[in-house]
Image (tube, rainbow, N blue to C red):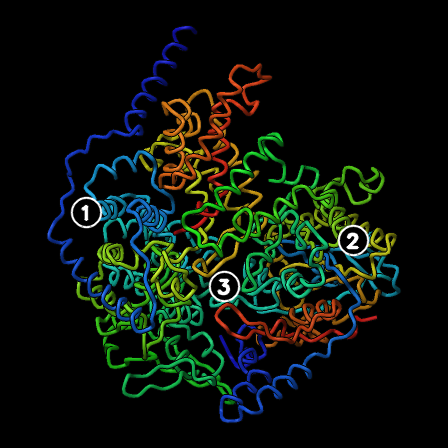
């Protein structure tokens, strides 16, 4: 049931309507209008305390369906809640990862963990929205995903430099990042297994016929009987067509083609769609893409949890590790934040079917690169949780909220995440209500 | 084997000959079999009052209005709004045989009796009622809910009755699909029970056109949420939201489905700045005097909501139907209609007529289709601005939603109508293509009437994607529009006209016809040359394909106008 704790919840929007800038605006409307411009300037200035960017891009390894923290980033071997799942040591003394994350374990000096994430969403779709946007679903507004915010905020920096989409989602269908109130133009470009040619970019006819089609299109757009002269400023009707054509013939498209990568490197990532997705993400970041999301589905282990998680870990481990290694080798690690996580975690208790169910009350996310220190662990879950529904937080130390991850990432990218953006109906909306997790910073 | 081939060829020939008679223009005007009943006169009378309201609004604001659109253009927007597709060439030929005065009325009636309308409108309503999420496994059956809505629309169930069923029905989510309105909100957080918070927010938005979601957490501090009565307008409070939510606590999810509980569960809440929980009584956020004393909480709520004096209920559906037909709501956002103060012209006239005429959705649609606003051209002789479009003095051009784009592409690749009477093969292809296309193109989701700008990926899909590509490639079996137009059109100008009608639902202008005619002429100049294959690019079939591709990629095709 709803209670006052919801006021700390960004979905409600209390603070979104009533933050300092909004209230100052109201003050202006209330008779202090001479103060308004100064007040606004002061308010904006006070809020713009972002640091120098330490990152340029983000890669999100999205474990769709919810990985079990107990079998991945937060094992408690030998306890009841482990239910016989095992752990292994890592390069960081005293830090353990779930069995099977062998390569990742060796790189833990470069990777940090947040083990105390909580949210209020226990349903997949709602939780995916929550994690990807930093807000709970709000029927009156679609919030932009983190990749869309990054592309929106860095648009001027990127202008004219990149022909391919700056926001790419590999192997996702419905869950791909969306532009929300920022507009469809910030939706992620969706692609599937990179071993196949990029869909919808190959012309279906020879160049001379394609040229004839474009000539006809240009003529018909410029002679459209339903357009005013001012609506004819774009050669082919709208700017998206021109951008799509530019993309079709861009050299930067090579970034999507992993066939030219030496076979040895391809193998490092694993011969799986996810592995190839991670390799593609690396190449896209190299080409100036701002956000790439690579999805590995199949983690929803309500039945036979251990075997299901182990199967997924087998795919995740080489790809995640190879990505970190190669980012470092190519001097991209300091410019790129890598996130690895799910919409929530899985229950500490096993169900009768040998599965673990949905658990938003203490789950993990891994972060690396882009100004994030390695080898650190933020938060803790109890190895012997009390599991009291009325007091979930007693089983956690240093509770962190989903939006804190957003604030940390956006801050690293030099984005003023506390600024308000106007939605299409003029509603001011803060980019993120989170707080930077300072323990993670270099 | 030979006999089989002959039989197959004969069937194809007979089929195409039959089709040809339906799609090649027949200059003879046929007798009008449309019954223009007195009912139409009553609709027109209401439409005239709405027109007058718009006229004075435009006059007051100094806004000049456009001229009327061509009937075919109006027919196209009706098809897109009511069925999510465009008229087939076969339908256009039928449409043109109706006398001009009756064409639109005939077309609206034709569409309203078509299952494509029932299914399409049901999905639009479902998005408002239950969203697009998959919901809880087992307990929620979205497809059953949509199918039930479609049946209600087919029966033309009065909208107030439909809403009362949704709010107050009990039973299993499979046998009584309306209860999926409740089961979609079930979650672990609510201990497997329907969520009164989500239901309160959803009900006010979907059925009352009010956004009071923010009151869940705090009183309205900005003075933007007016409740109360016209004589005593007040700002919304946190209590308003939770008192309404209390109306949804007398229902439990059980093994036998959604059941009314005998004893009414107390709804408790700790309000902002309070330290302890308090019992919250069931009340409604405005017009409390209309809330009956007797009945279960849900029955009382449903009765209050659909009371003829509760106009917010009718305004909400008027705004939604308007948005379906125009691609843009009368009040934007679609579910944020002020209870008090000024509302756009037409809103209250339509709502009053809706109430007085038994909450008849079809009548509402027919009246809107009669209005001047709906029949405006999307272009004018004078330079117009966004203000003209937002006030409906010029028909607002809006980007088609994904399901409309693919619906239109699928239909435009066939000269005959693709509907429930189409063959299974055609329907299967349609189903597969549509699903794949929408996945790639991107579903609009729940908030489907918001303004959108389109993406580069969508352009790639239209230019190079499978659905457009395969459906603009002529084949030897005369199974699609490209091959049929190539085969049936006796001359190039007729081919161009057929392509325009099939894809853009209009004839080409002289400038367009001349330009495209010159492309066809090139085939003649190359006719003596040796071709390396039949798609060398200078055969007539290739030109037909190229022109079709061009029109599919034209902004005009991808917009409602």
Q: Residues within 10 Å of mark 1 (few under 14, many from 20)?
A: few
Q: Disc 1 and disc 2: Cα gap in Å?
A: 76 Å
Q: Nearer the viewer, residue A371 or B367?
A: B367
* Secondary structure of residue under mark 1: helix
Q: According to the image, label 3 marks what residue?
A: B187
Instruction: Give residue B239's quadrant in the image.
Output: bottom left
The disc at residue B101 is 1
Q: The disc numbered 1 marks a residue on which chain? A: B
Q: Quadrant of the N terminus of chain B?
A: top left
Are the residues flagged by discs 3 and 1 from a single subunit? yes
Q: Nearer the viewer, mark 1 or mark 2?
A: 1
Instruction: Return the disc, 3 or 1, that comes first in the chain's sequence.
Output: 1
Q: The disc numbered 3 marks a residue on which chain? A: B
Say above or below: A386 vs A282: below
Is residue A39 left or right of A142 when viewed as pictured? right
* Secondary structure of residue under mark 3: loop
* Secondary structure of residue under mark 2: loop
Identified at 44% across, 66% down, the residue is B193
Q: According to the image, label 2 marks what residue?
A: A99
């Amino acid at each position: 049931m709803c209670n006052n704790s919801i006021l700390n919840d960004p979905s409600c929007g209390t603070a979104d309507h009533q933050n300092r800038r909004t209230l100052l605006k109201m003050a202006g409307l209330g008779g202090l209008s001479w103060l308004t411009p100064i007040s606004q300037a002061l308010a904006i200035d006070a809020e713009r305390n972002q640091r120098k960017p330490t990152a340029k891009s983000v890669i999100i390894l999205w474990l769709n369906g919810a990985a079990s923290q107990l079998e991945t980033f937060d094992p408690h071997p030998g306890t009841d809640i482990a239910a016989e799942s095992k752990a292994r040591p890592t390069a960081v003394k005293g830090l353990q990862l779930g069995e099977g994350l062998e390569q990742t374990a060796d790189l833990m000096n470069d990777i940090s963990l947040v083990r105390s994430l909580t949210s209020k969403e226990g349903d997949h779709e709602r939780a995916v929205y929550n994690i990807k946007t930093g807000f709970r679903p709000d029927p009156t507004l679609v919030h932009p995903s983190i990749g869309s915010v990054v592309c929106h905020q860095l648009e001027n920096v990127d202008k004219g430099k990149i022909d391919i989409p700056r926001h790419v989602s590999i192997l996702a269908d419905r869950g791909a990042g969306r532009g929300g109130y920022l507009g469809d133009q910030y939706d992620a470009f969706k692609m599937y297994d990179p071993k196949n040619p990029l869909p919808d970019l190959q012309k279906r006819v020879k160049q001379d016929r394609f040229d004839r089609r474009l000539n006809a299109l240009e003529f018909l757009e410029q002679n459209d009987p339903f357009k005013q002269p001012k609506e004819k400023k774009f050669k082919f009707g709208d700017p998206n067509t021109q951008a799509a054509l530019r993309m079709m013939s861009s050299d930067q498209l090579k970034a999507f083609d992993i066939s030219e990568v030496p076979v040895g490197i391809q193998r490092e990532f694993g011969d799986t769609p996810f592995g190839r997705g991670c390799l593609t993400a690396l190449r896209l970041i190299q080409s100036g893409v701002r956000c790439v999301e690579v999805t590995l589905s199949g983690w929803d282990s309500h039945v036979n949890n251990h075997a299901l998680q182990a199967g997924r870990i087998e795919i995740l481990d080489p790809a995640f590790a190879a990505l970190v290694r190669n980012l470092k080798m190519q001097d991209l690690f300091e410019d790129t934040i890598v996130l690895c996580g799910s919409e929530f975690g899985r229950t500490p208790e096993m169900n009768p079917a040998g599965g673990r169910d949905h658990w938003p009350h203490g789950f993990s996310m891994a972060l690396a690169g882009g100004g994030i220190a390695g080898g650190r662990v933020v938060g803790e879950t109890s190895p012997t949780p009390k599991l009291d529904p009325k007091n979930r937080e007693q089983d956690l130390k240093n509770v962190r909220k989903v939006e804190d991850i957003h604030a940390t990432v956006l801050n690293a990218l030099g984005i003023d995440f506390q600024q308000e953006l106007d939605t299409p109906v003029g509603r001011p909306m803060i980019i993120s209500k989170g707080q930077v997790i300072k323990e993670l910073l270099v | 084997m030979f006999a089989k081939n002959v039989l197959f060829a004969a069937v194809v020939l007979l089929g195409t000959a039959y089709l040809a008679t339906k799609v090649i223009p027949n200059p003879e005007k046929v007798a009008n079999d449309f019954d223009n009943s007195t009912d139409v006169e009553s609709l027109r009378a209401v439409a005239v009052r709405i027109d007058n309201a718009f006229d004075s609004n435009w006059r007051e604001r100094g806004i000049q209005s456009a001229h009327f659109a061509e009937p075919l253009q109006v027919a196209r927007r009706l098809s897109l709004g009511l069925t999510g597709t465009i008229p087939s060439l076969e339908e256009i030929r039928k449409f043109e045989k109706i006398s001009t005065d009756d064409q639109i009325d005939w077309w609206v009636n034709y569409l309203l009796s078509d299952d494509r309308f029932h299914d399409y409108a049901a999905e639009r309503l479902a998005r408002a009622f239950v969203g697009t999420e998959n919901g809880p496994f087992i307990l929620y059956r979205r497809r059953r809910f949509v199918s039930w809505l479609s049946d209600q629309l087919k029966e033309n169930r009065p909208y107030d009755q439909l809403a009362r069923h949704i709010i107050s029905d009990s039973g299993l989510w499979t046998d009584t699909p309306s209860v999926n309105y409740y089961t979609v909100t079930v979650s672990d957080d609510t201990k497997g029970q329907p969520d009164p918070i989500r239901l309160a927010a959803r009900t006010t938005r979907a059925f009352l056109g009010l956004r009071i979601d923010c009151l869940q957490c705090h009183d309205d501090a900005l003075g933007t949420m007016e409740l109360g009565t016209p004589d005593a307008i007040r700002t919304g409070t946190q209590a308003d939201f939770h008192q309404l939510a209390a109306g949804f606590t007398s229902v439990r999810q059980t093994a036998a489905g959604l059941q009314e509980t005998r004893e009414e569960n107390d709804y408790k809440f700790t309000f902002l700045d309070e330290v302890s929980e308090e019992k919250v009584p069931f009340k409604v956020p405005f017009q409390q005097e209309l809330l009956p004393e007797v009945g279960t909480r849900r029955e009382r709520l449903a009765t209050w909501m659909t009371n003829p004096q509760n106009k917010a209920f009718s305004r909400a559906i008027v705004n939604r139907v308007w948005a379906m037909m125009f691609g843009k709501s009368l009040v934007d956002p679609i579910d944020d209609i002020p209870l008090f103060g000024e509302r756009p012209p037409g809103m209250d006239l339509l709502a009053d007529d809706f109430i007085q005429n038994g909450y008849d959705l079809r009548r509402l649609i027919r009246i809107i289709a009669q209005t001047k606003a709906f029949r405006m051209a999307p272009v004018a002789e004078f330079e117009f601005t966004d203000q003209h479009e937002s006030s409906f003095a010029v028909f607002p051009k809006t980007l088609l939603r994904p399901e409309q784009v693919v619906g239109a592409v699928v239909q435009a690749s066939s000269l005959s109508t693709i509907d429930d009477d189409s063959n299974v093969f055609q329907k299967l292809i349609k189903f597969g293509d549509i699903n794949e296309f929408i996945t790639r193109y991107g579903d609009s989701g729940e908030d489907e009437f918001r303004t959108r700008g389109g993406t580069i990926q969508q352009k790639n899909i239209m230019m190079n994607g499978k659905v457009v590509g395969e459906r603009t490639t002529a084949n030897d079996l005369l199974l699609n529009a490209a091959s049929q137009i190539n085969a049936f059109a006796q001359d190039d100008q007729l081919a161009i006209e057929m392509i325009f009608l099939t894809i853009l639902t209009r004839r080409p202008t002289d400038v367009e016809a001349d330009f495209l005619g010159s492309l066809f002429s090139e085939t003649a100049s190359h006719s003596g040359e040796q071709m390396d294959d039949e798609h060398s690019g200078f055969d007539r079939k290739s030109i037909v394909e190229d022109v079709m591709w061009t029109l599919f990629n034209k902004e005009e095709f991808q917009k409602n106008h």
